[in-house]
Amino acid sequence: MKNTDLMNIHSIYGATEGEGTQIGSPQIFIRFQGCSVGCKNCDSRETWSFAPAQLMRLEDIHAKLAQWPKIKRASITGGDPLNPRLRDQTETLCHDLSQKNYWLNIEASGNVVDHKIFSMVNYISFDFKTPSTGVATRLENVSAVLKEYSSKVQIKSVIESKIDFEYVYNSYLTLDPQLQKDVTWVLTPAYNTGEELNAERIMQIYQWNMEIGGVFKVIVQQHKIIFGSKRLDV
């Protein structure tokens, strides 16, 4: 792919990471347009369509990044930046930004392990989908990403119910014992669009995790507590 080619970008915005192990880190989010995963509880459905949003060249992206000259952390998200229709664009962008000394996170939906892109980035946020999402992730993908990138990957799962929690825990137990030992697996209490903060759900997940020995990290979505349903990328 040539650097002059257009990239289908939904939005670029500066914000503080609101979830997962990097929570609290100011960074720039580069959100691709297009996703075919179809999670039932997705809070960014407007990024699903592959119809062109902002068609941007690398120089256009650089001009946006220049608004935050002191921030050298970027999160590549979507949509689904690893979807086959976007994957080459994502590779070009990751290569370019890594050459410019950006610390890069890739938000991966969990349906593919892309070794070339994963080797370029500093951190991988890898989804393991739960029953409430209506989508399944192959556990083989979790094992593959952990075997190669355990020092720079978090597995993330949205938990809405005890069914979700037990599904994740039973999946965790099937991993190779060494992978169980090394994994950083984050449970994100569901905070669905239109909901108020469900403190009871959060406390239940805390308790369930304690009962199994605390093998997971339970991290609430900070940005939703602060901003509610307000979108930061519009």
Image (tube, rainbow, N blue to C red):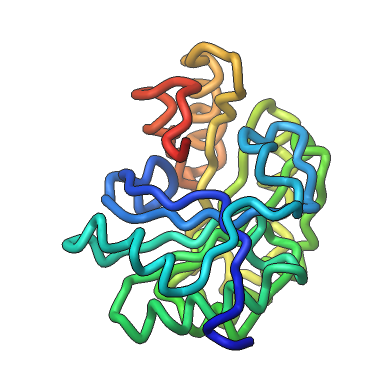
Establish if 164 lies above or below 213: above
Establish if 166 lies above or below 8: above
Q: Quadrant of the N terminus?
A: bottom right
Is residue 183 visible to us here?
no
Q: Nearer the viewer, residue 170 or 60?
A: 60
Q: Residue at x 69, y 37 (%)?
A: 45
Report which quarter residue 68 is drawn in.
Answer: bottom left
Report which quarter residue 204 is drawn in.
Answer: top right
Q: Residue at x 60, y 67 (%)?
A: 7
Give x and y (percent) for residue 93.
50, 75
Q: Residue at x 37, y 32 (%)?
A: 222
Q: Nearer the viewer, residue 228 or 146?
A: 228
Give x and y (percent) for residue 74.
37, 62
Q: Nearer the viewer, residue 109 or 63?
A: 63
Q: For this view, does 20 lie left or right of residue 56?
A: left
Q: For this view, does 161 lie left or right of residue 188?
A: right
Establish if 234 lies above or below 65: above
